[in-house]
Amino acid sequence: MSFFRLAIYVFVCVVLATTLFSCSSRTTPAPVSNINSSSVLGERNRDSIKTSQYLVKKGETLYSIAWRANSDVRKIARINKISSPYRIYPGQKLFLAESTVKKTAQVSKTKVSHKNSTKSSTANKKNSTKNTLASTKKQAYGENVSTRKSYQNSTLTSEKASGKFSQKISRWQWPVKGKVVEYFSNSAQGNKGIDITGRRGTKIKASTTGKVVYAGNALRGYGKLIIIKHNDDYLSAYAHNDRILVKEQQIINIGDVIATMGDTDANKVMLHFEIRFRGKSVNPLKYLPKNKIYNLITVNNKP
């Protein structure tokens, strides 16, 4: 009997040792989730652009780049002197900050000046200087001045058109019925919108009238994404769709079906919905109506 008990004891020890070894030999980290959320924290990092310069990749638009850079598309367009409808091409270098443009211009000017001074002979320095000064004066009071004024006027006109005050939107509506499982957060790694769960194939509707400025899956972390421009101030985004039912440049009315709910680049079927004001993320719950639908989905999880 004692031998039998000893055999059972040895067997149990072997099983436990094997189990512990298997757990310790895991080569990939276990997913870390927020205790109050069903989403994986790593998915919140939407591959945001942090650099001051950027090379355009295939499938991207100026709106999608501005979205990832948390910037206003008009600002990036102005810096790079790109006019509406903001067409860009793969491999194109974009400046995302005005300070970068100034530094690049100064470096370029210094290089050109150094190259010209090296090639110039000592005998021709005086004549070259006189000609340069004469040319500069002529241009300063001629074409350069008119061109600069024209550019400044167009910039001021554009800025005045956008206005210091936001362009009001008469009405917003919920893009889909469902339970909000993740709320907006201003923290660095926080959720920049709200996540609403539902069934695959559920119809996603435009939250208000606008024009589709992006429809695709080139932005890592968003899956199949739609971005709608509502006016010069507001954009809205609909991510993780199963099917996209609209095309870029298409005019959309409030309530139009634009996609179906899915789980592309997500760990569950849901809609990630964002609103941006002049390029910055804002809390969608401050804009969406607080109606019966809102009360229903927030009764057990108050924001």
Image (cartoon, helix red, strand yellow):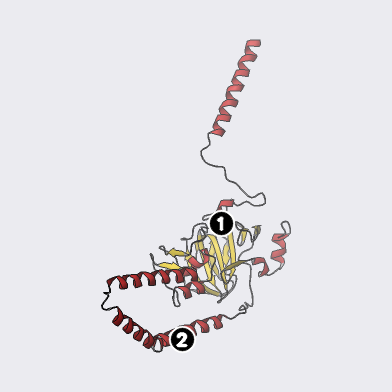
Q: Earlier in the sequence, mark 2 or mark 1?
A: 2
Q: Residue 76's spot in the image, x, y percent?
A: 49, 71
Q: Residues within 10 Å of mark 1 (few under 14, many from 20)?
A: some
Q: Residue at x 70, y 64 (%)?
A: 294
Apparent side of residue 136 relative to residue 122 in the rendered image (left or right):
right
**What residue type is disc 1 on?**
Arg
Q: Secondary structure at mark 2?
A: helix
Q: Quadrant of the N terminus?
A: top right
Q: Quadrant of the C terminus?
A: bottom right
Q: Is residue 131 at least partly visible in the picture?
A: yes
Apparent side of residue 214 relative to residue 144 in the rendered image (left or right):
right
Q: Residue at x 36, y 84 (%)?
A: 133
| Image quadrant in which you'd find residue 14 | top right
**What residue type is disc 2 on?**
Lys
In the picture, the disc for residue 149 is 2
Q: Secondary structure at mark 1?
A: loop
Q: Residue at x 58, y 30 (%)?
A: 20
Q: Nearer the viewer, residue 137 or 87?
A: 137
Q: Are marks 2 and 1 in contact (CB under 8 Å)?
A: no
Q: Residue at x 30, y 78 (%)?
A: 125
Q: Nearer the viewer, mark 2 or mark 1?
A: 2
